Amino acid sequence: MEVLWATSGGVVNACLSTALKGILNHERPVSTLRSDPGMPSSHAQSIFYTVAFCIILVIKFFGFNEITAVTSALIFAMGSYFSWLRVSQRFHTLNQVAVGAILGFCFSIFWFWLWDAIVMKAFINHFWVRIVAVVGAVGFCVGFLLYVIRNWVIEDLH
């Protein structure tokens, strides 16, 4: 269930990014490369959602020590590099990537806390919560997958 929870958090994070792009409507540095708004960077937001989740899990399962500190720093560095590529390829400004990274990192911490502090306890103590959580997470992820596939097909037709 924890994997489904993390995956559904990634989907919610992506939906948050899409909603914020529509609200902020901030142009990309080179508008001819992509037509959608650039703030926040969806890629940076998704990358740093994953970065934060990985760092939290590494520290949760192995404790905080020299090895996990180095591992966490490497995970953070890789996420930073992949996010920076969005700037170097001129898909986003540095501010767009920074905002996306901060949002993704913060949302990941919130999503992990929500599971750890609230949902997991209810999941363990109530059978109906298990059913709702599993069916909801699977349905949410499958729905998002179908949405993405549908948009790829539509994009390929144009």
Image: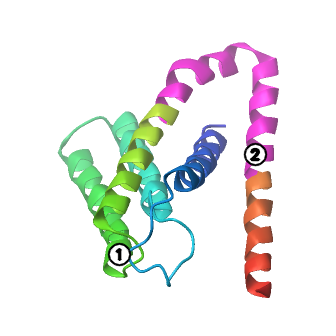
User: Which residue type carries mark 1?
Assistant: Leu
Which residue in the protein does label 2 denote?
140
* Image location of residue 128, percent across then percent down: 82, 19
User: Mark 2 Cα within 10 Å, few/some/many (few <14, many 20+)?
Assistant: some
Please say whether residue 132 is one of the residues in the magenta stretch: yes
Q: What quarter of the picture does the N terminus occupy? A: top right
Total numbered circles: 2
Residue name at image x 17 percent, y 45 percent? 66
Residue 90 image position (x, y, % from top left) = 37, 79
Q: Secondary structure at mark 2?
A: helix
Q: For mark 1, what is the residue?
A: 85
Disc assigned to residue 53: none
Q: Which residues are magenta?
A: 112-141
Q: Residue type at mark 2?
A: Phe
Q: Horizontally, is 7 left or right of 26 in the view?
A: right
The secondary structure that most of the magenta stretch takes on is helix
Q: Image quadrant for the C terminus?
A: bottom right
**Residue at 65 percent of width and 44 percent of height:** 8
Q: Quadrant of residue 84?
A: bottom left
For residue 86, which quarter of the picture? bottom left
Q: Looking at the image, what colour scheme do you see? A: rainbow
Q: CA distance from mark 2 to mark 1?
A: 30 Å
Closer to the chain start, of discs 2 and 1, is: 1
Q: Are marks 2 and 1 in contact (CB under 8 Å)?
A: no
